């Protein structure tokens, strides 16, 4: 399973409505993700991720779910859920990518509700969704605890939350074009964030909201458990049914004490899925 299926679009850093944010997109950012989101490799990674999440959720065959895709970008992940008949809503702060997502969904014959909105102030009632997915988003939200509070609020009891984000343990990362950036001290990271948001946008791949936060699976699991998510899965749990050599390796990682920690250090991103009790 890829640790970064595709970081399509960041989300703003406060709890204000999306109208108070810059919802435009840098041309290079838009062009890159418009092209990358349409590649067979990206579709394949997202399809594998969807199938792993559905297997872990373990609902009866044929169950149609209300799914929220936060930071949906050009809509690749949303469309893959819709093709199975699930009821899908996608939000992003990047309005040009939302327009592209609507166009692609229409061309594919899917009725998906795409909205420009902030992840820290979701425009949905409590307990609206069975599955809430937030791929490559949490690192871009300065007030990430408020973001998780909102994701939890709109998730139904028994629902599944999926997060993929940065990994502080791993020296390899794709957020900044700087070597070993995830290991930089916070004061130095803040300096490069300021540069990326002002005079050096190329440092963070022209993202308007670069990565502010760095996480570990173990830290996120502890945080989510304190908020009622008692069943948490990492990438090795989710891909546990893999066949062949990969399945054997993942089985060893799950079964040998300490090996899971070593394996997490080797992963450029953090993945966690959790069930809300």
Image (cartoon, grey):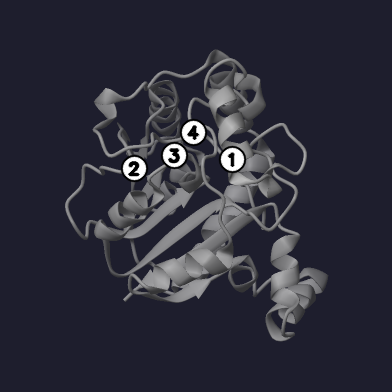
How far from the left and from the top, in percent, is residue 201? 60, 20
Instruction: Tell me the tag on residue 187.
Output: 1
Image quarter of the C terminus: bottom left
Q: Sequence order check: which comes first, mark 4 or mark 3?
A: 4
Image quarter of the N terminus: bottom right
Residue sitting at x 41%, y 18%:
24
> Is mark 4 in CB contact (under 8 Å) with mark 2?
no
Q: Sequence order check: which comes first, mark 4 or mark 2?
A: 4
Residue positioned most to the front: 187
Whether 167 is drawn above or below 70: the answer is below
Q: Which residue is mark 3?
A: 72
Disc 1 is placed on an element classified as: helix
Disc 2 is placed on an element classified as: loop
Residue positioned most to the right: 245
Q: Sequence order check: which comes first, mark 3 or mark 2?
A: 3
Whether 122 is drawn above or below 246: the answer is above
Q: Sequence order check: which comes first, mark 1 or mark 3?
A: 3
Residue sitting at x 72%, y 55%:
170
Q: Nearer the viewer, mark 1 or mark 3?
A: 1
Residue sitting at x 43%, y 44%:
78
Disc 4 is placed on an element classified as: loop
Q: Residues within 10 Å of mark 3 (few under 14, many from 20)?
A: many
Disc 3 is placed on an element classified as: loop
Q: Which residue is mark 2?
A: 119
């Amino acid at each position: 399973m890829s640790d970064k299926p595709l970081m399509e679009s960041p989300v703003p850093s406060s709890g204000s409505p999306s109208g108070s944010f810059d919802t435009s997109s840098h041309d290079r950012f838009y062009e890159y993700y418009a092209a990358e989101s349409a590649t067979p490799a990206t579709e394949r990674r997202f399809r594998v991720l969807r199938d792993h999440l559905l297997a872990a959720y373990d609902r009866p065959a044929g169950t149609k779910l209300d799914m929220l895709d936060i930071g949906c970008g050009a809509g690749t992940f949303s469309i893959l859920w819709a093709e199975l008949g699930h009821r899908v809503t996608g939000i992003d702060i990047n309005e040009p990518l939302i327009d592209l997502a609507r166009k692609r969904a229409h061309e594919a014959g899917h009725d998906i509700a795409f909205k420009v909105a902030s992840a820290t102030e979701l425009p949905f009632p409590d307990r609206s969704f069975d599955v809430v997915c937030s791929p490559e988003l949490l690192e871009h939200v300065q007030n990430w605890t408020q973001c998780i509070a909102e994701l939890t609020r709109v998730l139904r009891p028994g629902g599944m939350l999926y997060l993929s984000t940065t990994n502080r343990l791993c020296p390899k990362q794709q957020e900044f074009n700087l070597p070993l950036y995830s290991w930089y001290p916070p004061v130095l990271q803040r300096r490069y964030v300021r540069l990326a948001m002002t005079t050096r946008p190329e440092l963070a791949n022209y993202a308007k909201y670069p990565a502010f936060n760095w996480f570990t699976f173990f830290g996120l699991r502890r945080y989510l458990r304190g908020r009622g998510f008692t069943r948490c899965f990492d990438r090795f749990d989710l891909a546990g049914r893999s066949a062949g050599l990969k399945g054997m390796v993942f089985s060893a990682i799950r079964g040998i004490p300490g090996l899971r920690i070593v394996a997490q250090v080797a992963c450029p991103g953090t993945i966690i899925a959790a069930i809300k009790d």
